[in-house]
Image: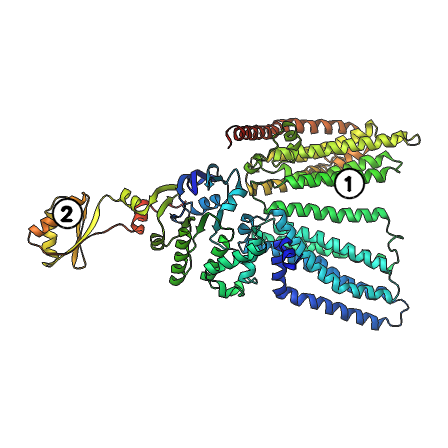
Amino acid sequence: MLALEVRGLTKRFGKLVAVDDVSFGIERGRITGFIGPNGAGKTTTMRIAATLELPDEGDVLLDGVSVLDDPRGARSKLGFMPDSYGAYPSTTLWEYLDFFARAYGLSGDVRRRRVAEVLDFTSLGPLREKEMGALSKGLKQRLCLAKTLLHDPSVLILDEPAAGLDPRARVELRELVRALAGMGKAILVSSHILTELAEMCDGIAVIEAGKLKATGSVSDVTRGIQVATPVFVRVLEGPDRLERALHELPGVERVRREAEGVVFEHAGTPEALSSVLAALVAAGLRPVEFTPRAMGLEEVFLSLTEGKMQ
Amino acid sequence: MSARARSDRLNPVLLKEVRQALRSRTFAILFPTCLAVAVVFAIGVLVDRSQVENPGPSVFMPVFVILEIAALGLVPFSAFQSMAGEWDEGSHDLLVLSHLSPGRIVLGKLLTASVEAGLYFCAFLPLLLFTFLLRGVDVRDVLFLVVTLYVASMAMCCVALAAAGLSRLRFLRVVLLAALAGLGFGALVVGVELAEQFVERGRGFGTGFSNDDLLGLAFTLVGTGLVAFMFATTRIAHPEDDRSGAPRVAFTAILVAALAVIGFGLAGSVSQQDVYQWAAILAVCTSIPAIFFATEADRLPRRVRANVPANTVWAILATPFLPGGGRGVLWYLVQLALIAVWAFVVSAGLASSPDLHMYAWDTVGAQRWFAFVSYFVIYVAGFSLLCLRITDRPGGRLVARLALPVGALLTMLLPALIGFVFGIRGWESMKHPFFPFWTVFDKDAAPVRTYAILCGLVALGASTPRLVRAVSEVLAARRVRAARALEVATHGG
């Protein structure tokens, strides 16, 4: 059973279709990056999954519990970290977590132990008596994540958790999210920092103008959209001879110079690509580098989306 | 039970807010300042009036006024800020996602306000009681005024919490805060007048202030507080949750209590006119919440559909108390029916007395009341029908809620203007058929009453499809729920 299952979700705001028949799922222990330009429908989808908005059509199941039929039941499975975390400036970290632990119905030693655990997990223990107003943005984000984990949810929805964080805080957050996936939690995370997501996520869901453009593992999505593999080649004889030789070979397209080598695109099988290398050697060229390049998440995103705004 | 175990039972919002308040500069500055000002005033007045025989009242009043400022101004303001802060800090979503119900959240805020007010009262009470030793002030009067002020403070806090939940826009909240300040000032003036009556004019408890007055005051304060509390609760609930069911039940409960109290009070009355005048007053009061209920979006919210009673009879009985504009009109009609039945029963009771039978709620009395009520049926049911297309949107609902009372006022005032411009006799002085009070009270208006009732019936007739839809939607939801329950029972979910 999928831990998070989005089924045919549609949400309209007047004439605007913010989310249009979106479906995807996340298994336990997997992290899925939710990618899309501003106004694509990411936050709306996440808020529907978090029971804060209602769809016009479709449903979201959290561990099999419908957010429509049983929002209270769904909330106990869910940890939602919104893009604007709620802070109480004159409250200490411990008081903040203690309050939300009480709000989630934890009592006595269970509550105290759980607060200590999440403080420990997020490495905020030494700061427990510090007031929230004095925290940096990175620490506030970590505190918000700690709050999200208090009731030990099986599904985490993180809306732009890395926004505004410095590189160190981003790395720390990434490690925390990975650790959570290691604990078997299904995680849906949205971010504009695609390199960040690429290093963190097992899968992606790309949305634009309310429509889901692609979903699956990063490599599956890349394979699905990639028609030709860019290959970087460098030979001892220099780029001029190499460029001329490549132009004569079958299956080689879009040859262009890059640094001291040449990049070409090849749409064939790995065997055909291997024969290109063999042909270059047969032509008397001595390759020192022959590297097929995989598409990065940014290239995938740019290939899939058209920059549509709504 | 240990202190730790006891703290587990406390409302989490109360605990969090008290912790915050203890660190807040606002309370740390305002509380001692108020107390210091009160002490300085008391000593000043005492020194100034040292030669007066009974200086108690002179010392009591300034101290009580400062306590009033704290109880009706500072504490409600603090409650308002606390609720508004949940929107501003973005913590509202986090609270909603927790296991805290909207009722517990608002109750936590109210309890915090009660603790804050309690601290002010604990600090001021010795000063106020001290005036008893100065002579001229009765301890009972002091305690009565203090208890009344505390209840009034809590009612104001409920109003403040409801006002803070009305809008997420800061600009609108500033306007609401200004309105709240105006209300607080009005309450303060009334409180000063009441205190003067008690301690300065000697019309204290048991002399100038009757049990009826006490009952009326308690009813007003508790009723206002209860309604505001319900309203605040619904404002932080999800739009697809039942946001108007609790206020509908609360208003009905208040109406029934009011009918019982007034009926009890009228038992010794000798005039049937009292009965239909009260019935008319209550109909007007009921039309105020009815404006809000009748201008809700007509459709049944999705999360409410899942909770419609599975039993047909219960579903039908619950229909007026479920959210939706059509059901709001239905709720209003139920309240009017309750008032009419009450008036009939009370009149019959009056008529059964051999000395009073001539004052029974006769045909003329009934006709007057129904004519009067017809106007309000037109204002609520008829006008809300015209706004049906816009009530699906929050902005549209706001427009409709303004349009209904403004439209009613215009139908009363425009004919007067037309009468003034075109010289129609009587119209300029509001003696026209669009003014319900003239129709009811003027003896020349008897024929108009029949037309008013007919127009009311036409408005009701036009609303019939909407009312039928309101009921059938509930019944359809009941059928779906029953079918799902059957499916779960058959296939085990």
Give the answer, above or below, for where B131 lies relative to A245. Answer: below
Asked which quadrant contains residue A89, the reply is bottom right
Disc 2 sits on a residue from what chain?
A: A
Instruction: Give percent across and percent down for residue B34.
Output: 71, 66
Question: Which image quarter: residue B117?
Answer: bottom right
Left or right side of B304 for B288: right
Q: Can you see residue B51? A: yes
Q: Which residue is found at the position 83% from the left and 48% from the top? A: B213
* Mark number displayed over residue B391: none
Instruction: Answer with left or right where residue B175 lies relative to residue A74.
Output: right
| Quarter-of-image position of residue B320 | top right
Which residue is disc 1 drawn over?
Answer: B258
Give the amino acid at mark 2.
Ser
Q: Residues within 10 Å of mark 2 (few under 14, many from 20)?
A: few
User: Toward the viewer: B379 or A195?
Assistant: A195
Please state, as top left, top right, bottom left or bottom right, where the N terminus of chain A lies in the image. Answer: top left
Question: Label 2 belongs to which residue?
Answer: A274
* B205 to the left or right of B86: right
